[in-house]
Amino acid sequence: MLLQWNHFFSRHCLALIAGTSILIAGADVNAQVVPGTGTKVDGSWDDFEDESWEFVTNLPKSSYNVDKQTRYPLGQSANSIWTESAKRGQPDILQRVPTPPGGLPGSKGALLMKSLHTGVPGHGSRGTNQDDLIMQGNMVSVNFSPSVVTRVYLPPFEEWEDKTGTSFGFRTAVKAPMKSKSKSRRRFFRSSSYSTKIETLYLGMFIQFNSKTDSPNGEDSAVFIVRADTSGQDFIGPEIKQTGWWTLGMSFTPDGRIHYYASPGVDPLTPADRFASHLPYGTRIQSFHTAFFNVCNQDNGRTWSTEWIIDDPAMYYISR
């Protein structure tokens, strides 16, 4: 069923998919680190239990990715853990809400994210856009096996924005060496050389909704799309066969790999929840920096995004 959806994937919020297999790309299964192992990174977690939790917007928000406008000062949560993206702006609604049923035991608060204008504030566009909410980060070397975990509430399919395309993202920013090709022209011939520099890579998991409006079998469905494999391409992850709460995680090991995990429910992740490991873009990750969330919609000025609710996002590391 997954293959029949390839031609529907969004070209604006998500790169085209190059493959459909779920891979463990040469990783030693004994070398994995389950996300959530170790110690929480100070200042890089939030449980939304504070009833006075608030996000202070400084409108209009940024939309540099669309119109090259970064509008300072950026929005920020009162607890200084969350900030607006200077590139894309924060979701239009960021609100603490009661934890939906089935959430973490004892949890009374979670964070709702929702957007109408994901492009230029107050203006619709003809394509899909996204807003970003960025967690306060700390640089952690992969030698300390950093990881990040979150719980995400998936509403019933009938409550999703009625479009086939990317709806949500759980992402990370990491540093890794990347080769770039440069050309030099001499009198009689051209030559090429390669240089290596440290670049930021944005890895993570998207949730792709496949609307029954476009479906040949008249059914709604969803699937994880993952960035990225060894060749740098997005690939298809697990199919989402149930809505409600899910636990998502990513870990980074001293061998430079990223490991992807997903499991329905709110229980702690286990080794069995890993579905892929890669040297993304064919390079070895050196350090983990932060995590962030994407909220996507068709940005037509009329249709709201799906309501996404997260709880207890946190970064971890293992002391050596």
Image (spheres, rainbow, N blue to C red):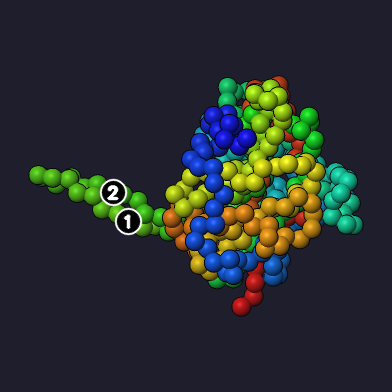
Q: Residue at x 60, y 52 (%)?
A: 172
| SS state under label 1 | strand
Residue 158 appears in view:
yes
Q: Identify whether 188 is placed above or below 247.
A: above
Q: Position of residue 255 (x, y in %)?
A: 50, 67
Q: Position of residue 281 (x, y in %)?
A: 45, 52
Label 1 packing within 10 angstroms: few (<14), some (14-19), many (20+): few
The N terminus lies in which quarter of the figure? top right
Going by the numbered disc 1, the residue's amino acid type is: Ser
Give the numbered dot on residue 93: none
The C terminus lies in which quarter of the figure? bottom right
The quarter of the displayed image where residue 244 is located: top right
The residue labelled by disc 2 is 182
| SS state under label 2 | strand
Please report whichever mark, 2 or 1, sits nearer to the chain's N-terminal start: 2
Q: Is residue 232 left or right of residue 155?
A: left
Label 2 packing within 10 angstroms: few (<14), some (14-19), many (20+): few
The residue labelled by disc 1 is 195
